[in-house]
Amino acid sequence: MQTTNWQKSTFSGDSSNCVYVAAPTPVSIHLRESDEPDIILATSPSLLRMLIRTLKGNLLPQ
């Protein structure tokens, strides 16, 4: 059984509303929120990168 190592986002600071991220495999990234830790969003590194670029307004490929 594999243990998932969750890491709190540095943007969460010391607040109680935190976002956690884990990379259980090289092709999978999991996200969860401290309010609902049993709900886990699974995505790929490339799709998460695309989401972050879109949210930042940087749509240029790197």
Image (cartoon, helix red, strand yellow):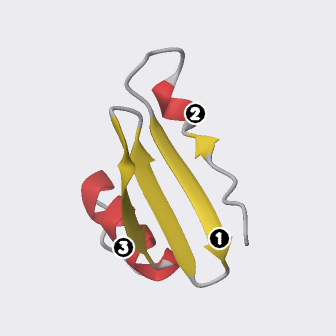
* Image x and y of residue 11, in percent: 49, 31
CA distance separating discs 3 and 1: 20 Å
Q: Is residue 25 left or right of residue 52?
A: right
Q: Nearer the viewer, residue 49 or 26?
A: 26
Q: Nearer the viewer, residue 35 or 22?
A: 35
Give the residue at mark 3. Answer: 50
Residue 10 numbered tag: 2
Q: Nearer the viewer, residue 16 or 49?
A: 16
SS assignment at label 3: helix
Amino acid type indicated by mark 2: Thr
Looking at the image, residue 33 lies above or below residue 32: above
* Image x and y of residue 39, in percent: 33, 54
* Image x and y of residue 50, in percent: 36, 73
| For discs 2 and 3, the disc positioned in front in the rendered view | 2
Q: Nearer the viewer, residue 34 or 49?
A: 34
Looking at the image, residue 59 lies above or below residue 21: below
Amino acid type indicated by mark 1: Pro
| Residue appearing at x 73%, y 72% in the figure | 1
* First in sequence: mark 1 vs mark 2: 2
Q: Are marks 2 and 3 in contact (CB under 8 Å)?
A: no
Amino acid type indicated by mark 3: Met
| Residue appearing at x 41%, y 34% in the figure | 34
Give the residue at mark 1. Answer: 24
CA distance separating discs 2 and 3: 20 Å
